[in-house]
Amino acid sequence: MTSVVISKIISLQSSFTVSENEISQFVINNTDFVITNTITNLAKAIGTSEASINRFCKKVGYKGFNNFKIALAQSTSNNTREIQNYLNKDTNIIESVSLDYRQLINNTSAMLNEEALIKSANLIKEANNIHIISLINTSFVANEFAFKLSLIGLNVKSHTDILDIHLCTSNISSKDLLIVIVPTLLCKDIYPALIASKERGAKIISITSNDSPKLNDIVDVKLITADKIIAANSLSLSNSLMTLFTIDLIYSLLLRDNKSLRQCKMSSDTIVSTHQTIDRYLIDF
């Protein structure tokens, strides 16, 4: 299990320079040393400059090394207590995997902020059309979010086929919203779609487990989730639960702040429930 600060570092790894990657690897593998030493000692141990370490800390989201070290110490302390509680009792696979998921949700919660979630909800409400694009292992999450938004009367469509994605983004309008749900935006089928949508004036929300400051000018709202790589059972877990958690947060805000959307949701739930109910005479025998 990994602390929130380490989760944030992992989410940014694809955007690090060679020097920043060396610092990140040292921090991930030598957390106690970082917490108990000065920036001068850390620079000597890594073989880099103090200025490089400060730049690294700012890139990860802290004002400087001291703020970074305090946050790392606090998150590591909280994580250590949970691990100790875990080790103090006999555990089975249910407890092991559930602990992994709790850690992932806790880290995702710490990496998200309510302001970004509120902005996402507002963009969804204001959009004429909502297009949700995704690929392969996250495509069912896109379909789930599209279904949830359709239940409250919004004009939404999910796109999980590469050709469909490119057709959608080449015809999107400035009054539309694009929601991108993928592990990373820096892939050959997604990045061109982002550029095409931005050039046409569409608003963009991304939900990913990999961050990159290079995308700040392209994406209107970035929502970063914790990656399953931090978990003890990472090979068997899915990142999709963190994505579903994030879209449920946005959905909760939509329903909390709008009475008409709540009414629409309840009406839709009634229709869905009725449709799924089988007449008793069909099973009586």
Image: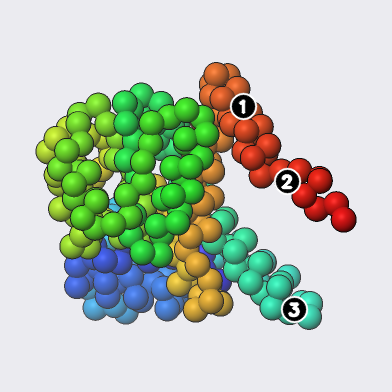
User: Which residue in the protein does label 1 denote?
Assistant: 267
For disc 1, the neighbor class at 10 Å (few under 14, some 14 to 19, many from 20) is some
Report the quarter where the N terminus lies.
bottom right
Q: Is residue 282 above or below residue 253?
A: below
Q: Residues within 10 Å of mark 2 (few under 14, many from 20)?
A: few
Residue 110 visible to an observer of this rendering: no
96 to 249, vertically: above or below: below
Q: Position of residue 127 (x, y in %)?
A: 33, 27
Q: What amino acid is found at the position of numbered circle 3 in the picture?
A: Thr
Closest to the camera, between mark 3 and mark 2, is: 2
Disc 3 versus disc 1: nearer the observer:
1
| Label 3 residue SS | loop
Residue at point 75%, 78% (across, down)? 91
First along the sequence among labels 3 and 2: 3
Q: Secondary structure at mark 1?
A: helix
**3D distance between C-alphas at marks 3 and 2:** 41 Å
Q: Residues within 10 Å of mark 3 (few under 14, many from 20)?
A: few
User: Label 1 amino acid?
Assistant: Ser
Query: What percent of the width, then of the height, locates residue 107?
Result: 52, 57
Q: Which quadrant of the structure image shows residue 50?
A: bottom left
Q: Which is nearer the N-term, disc 2 or disc 1?
A: 1
At which x and y percent is residue 167?
18, 47
Q: Amino acid at mark 2?
A: Ile
Going 54% across and 50% down the picture, which residue do you hit? 245
81 and 247: which is toward the camera? 247
- Report the residue marked by disc 3: 91
In this image, 134 relative to 173: left or right?
right
Identify the disc placed on residue 278.
Answer: 2
